[in-house]
Image (spheres, helix red, strand yellow):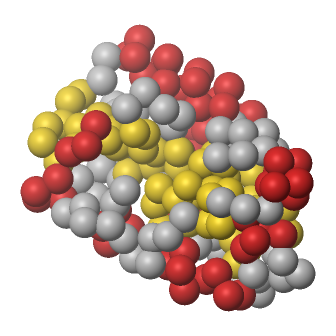
Amino acid sequence: MFKKFEEKDSISSIQQLKSSVQKGIRAKLLEAYPKLESHIDLILPKKDSYRIAKCHDHIELLLNGAGDQVFFRHRDGPWMPTLRLLHKFPYFVTMQQVDKGAIRFVLSGANVMCPGLTSPGACMTPADKDTVVAIMAEGKEHALAVGLLTLSTQEILAKNKGIGIETYHFLNDGLWKSKPVK
């Protein structure tokens, strides 16, 4: 999704959000990520002014007061954390671990296939379909990518074919390389 993302070309407009919209977004984030509640004020303080950067392909970036990209979404999908935020607060998203063979493919933006999640080096945390997940790598400390489960973990174990996680944002893509938006 962010493979060819560039700040200057991709961001079409930036809007200041009303306080009522900010409250709604905070509520949606807390509903989607209950473990985030203790740190939501560090990430998105109540008194801070948030902005939405509208980008090409119906992508929206949620910016905090400093201009850092903290969450993004595609169309009206779920808000997903950026990898920078996930590296600071790694605990609030379900983690799925891929084996060593999948690392180079994930880092090039490929979706995670079911066999990469069921092989001996991989580890799956039980989750439902359409859950936002952090894609971890065998033997690595930080997340490689953020994605959305296309099948539940039970279906992945049973089927073991096809795409298991649709990758949205990965290390060294355009969003990772972008600087804070002023």
Rendering coords of residue 103 (x, y %)? 61, 83
Does 74 appear above or below 87? Answer: above
Viewer-side residue, 38 vs 60? 60
Left or right of 20? Residue 60 is left
Exactly how many numbered labels are in the figure? Answer: 0
Rendering coords of residue 97 (x, y %)? 76, 70
Does 98 appear above or below 20? Answer: below
Viewer-side residue, 41 vs 2? 2
Left or right of 81? Residue 49 is left
Q: Residue furthest top?
A: 20
Viewer-side residue, 127 vs 160? 160
Let me know if residue 25 appears in the view. yes
Write down the quadrant of residue 121 in the picture.
Answer: bottom right
Does 6 appear above or below 27? Answer: below
Rendering coords of residue 92 (x, y %)? 72, 49
Write down the quadrant of residue 113 in the picture.
Answer: bottom right
Which residue is located at x 20 percent, y 30 percent?
Answer: 15
Does 19 appear above or below 136? Answer: above
Which residue is located at x 73 percent, y 73 percent?
Answer: 116
Write down the quadrant of residue 74 in the picture.
Answer: top left
Let me know if residue 88 appears in the view. no
State which quarter of the image contains the N terminus: bottom left
Which residue is located at x 34 percent, y 60 percent?
Answer: 2
Rendering coords of residue 150 (x, y %)? 64, 46
Which residue is located at x 44 percent, y 78 percent?
Answer: 108
